[in-house]
Image (cartoon, grey):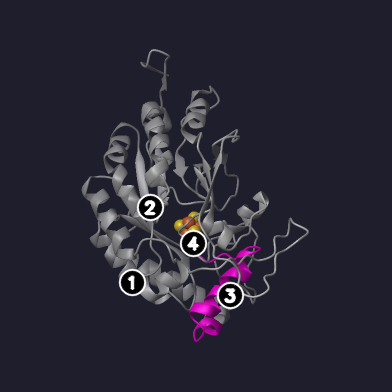
Amino acid sequence: MRYVNNPPNPWLSTHHEWIGEPPEARLEVFEETATRSIITNNNSPDIPFDFSVNCYRGCTHGCTYCFSRPTHEYLGFGAGTDFDRKIVVKVRAPELLREELMKKSWKGDVLVFSFTSDPYIPLEANYQLTRRCLEVCLEFRNPISIITKGALIRRDLGLIKQLSEEADAMVHFTIPFLDHDVNRAVEPFAPFPEARFKAMKEFAEAGIEVGLGIAPIIPGLNEHEIPELLERARDAGAKSAFINLLRLPGSVRPYFLERLEEKMPLRAQKIINRIKEVKGGVLNRSGFGERMRGEGPYWDMIVQTFKIHARRLGLNQARYEMKDRRQTFRRPSAQGSLFE
Ligand code: SF4
């Protein structure tokens, strides 16, 4: 059982402290109908895409390191267990997406599912918002890219394959750990790595471009797994892979550290020291260009390990270029036919 545990919300003037045991953190679902826009324009220079679609706020996968946690604080929720258990569902996402793709200003750029939540959390099995948004993309032949830990993506293999043929589609599976104990400690409700590799293999066998995200690298915890993770990804049909360094902005930091000390008390201090070692003596840096990259000999060793093994396994040999949007994007007419 998990108990309510949230760092103080910097946007609120009050904070709950529990006398005795806090209540159980139960799943609560909030259906949001007032959403005005579903496409988010990303203007961070170190994020490699421009537009993303998030059908959910919060994420039941509950990764302790998730840098999206502070987004929940803007809603008046907490960045800890609230982020994992109070899920906002944008029930109008497919309709909104269709409206936005109909606008003349939309030029058919790649849409990334998702950025601040996982598009394949278990709630998606019922709501089917990601699926319906992908159907809209297929209708418009709009290229898509997916980043997920959710094995539920297998449900949509046929649809994504069709998208890859008629527009373009790429799927990155985020798999930063192989060790089950570590996986349960830091990604408590995400599918096990084996389930993600299985999904990756099925997608690759279907002819869909797949890649591996070893994200995040948590120095002192998972860098030794890089070679085997890359090997498993190559065996599952991945052509590319990337790494990102752990980010601990705002309230993520106290939540991550508390969980780390609770779940891995004997390793926690070594991990904290390693994180500081690659971040210039601090636990987080927020500047563009340095947020997801480290510095110093230990970080260089991690990067070299990644590069050497990726090269040995034939990964990242050629950058996958998504099809030019002008080749595929079409706006349907009222009668359902396609025109530019
Ligand atoms: S799956 Fe992604 S969005 Fe969900 S908690 Fe983990 S890191 Fe955050």
Evaluate if marks 2 and 3 touch, with contact meaning CB atoms under 8 Å apart: no
Which amino acid type is shown beneath numbered disc 2? His
Specify the segment rendered in magenta.
245-270
Query: Who comes first in sequence, dot 1 or dot 2?
Result: 2
Query: Which residue does the image show at 34% across and 56% down from the upper left?
Result: 240
Q: Earlier in the sequence, mark 4 or mark 3?
A: 4
* First of labels 1, 4 by sequence position: 4
Q: Which class describes the residues within 10 Å of circle 4: few (<14), some (14-19), or many (20+)?
A: many
Which residue is under mark 4?
62
* Mark 1 lies on residue: 227
Q: Which residue is mark 3?
A: 258
Mark 1, other Cα within 10 Å: few <14 / some 14–19 / many ≥20: some
Query: Is tag 2's residue or tag 3's residue first in the polypeptide sequence?
Result: 2
Q: Nearer the viewer, residue 326 or 163?
A: 163
Q: Cβ of disc 4 within 8 Å of ligand 1?
A: yes
Please name the amino acid that badge 1 sits on: Pro
The picture places residue 59, in percent across and down from the top left corner, at 50, 54
Q: Can you name the residue that lies furthest to the right here? A: 13
| Residue 41 position in % (x across, y down) | 57, 40
Mark 1 vs 3, N-terminal side: 1
Write down the residue under mark 2. Answer: 172
| Mark 4 touches mark 3? (CB < 8 Å) | no
330 and 20: which is toward the camera: 20
Left or right side of 62 for 42: right
Quarter assignment of residue 110 = top left
| Element class at badge 4 | loop
Q: Nearer the viewer, mark 1 or mark 2?
A: 2
Determine whether 328 is above or below 144 in the image: above
The residue under the point 44% across, 66% down is: 188
Under circle 3, the secondary element is helix
Say which mark, if any, is on residue 246: none
Measure the alpha-carbon separation of dots 1 and 3: 29 Å
